[in-house]
Image (spheres, grey):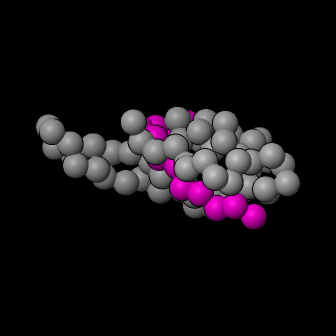
Amino acid sequence: MIVRSYSGSTMDAALEKVRGDLGKDALIIETRAVREPGLLGKRIGYEVVAAGDPASGVDVTKPATHLE
């Protein structure tokens, strides 16, 4: 089982990154809202921790996608 953390400006964006990287059968372990420092104050983002099966073709050498 491979566990990775993904971030996005919306929950849908973060979950899309999970599906794109780990596939539709990924197991969502945790979701949470996070505050990140920004130029005009703090902005809200979302973090999703998900797990996938390496036998399903997940590239284990590729780093997870993070907040843009």
Q: Is residue 2 visible?
A: yes
The residue at 52%/43% (across/down) is: 65
Left or right: 38 with respect to 5? left
Q: Is residue 28 visible?
A: no
Image quarter of residue 49: bottom right
Q: Position of residue 4 (x, y in %)?
A: 59, 57
Left or right: 1 with respect to 39? right
The residue at 48%/52% (across/down) is: 47
Residue 7, magenta (yes or no): yes
Q: Quadrant of the N terminus?
A: bottom right
Q: Quadrant of the C terminus?
A: top left
Q: Position of residue 30 (x, y in %)?
A: 58, 61
Left or right: 14 with respect to 51? left
Q: Position of residue 55 (x, y in %)?
A: 85, 54
* Magenta span of residues: 1-12
The residue at 52%/35% (across/down) is: 13
Q: Nearer the viewer, residue 45 or 5?
A: 5
The residue at 14%/37% (across/down) is: 40
Q: Position of residue 59 (x, y in %)?
A: 70, 48
Q: Nearer the viewer, residue 31 or 22?
A: 22
Query: Farthest residue toward the right?
Result: 55
Q: Nearer the viewer, residue 1 or 44?
A: 1
Residue 50, magenta (yes or no): no
Left or right: 31 with respect to 41? right
Query: Farthest residue toward the front?
Result: 61
Number of labels in the image equals 0
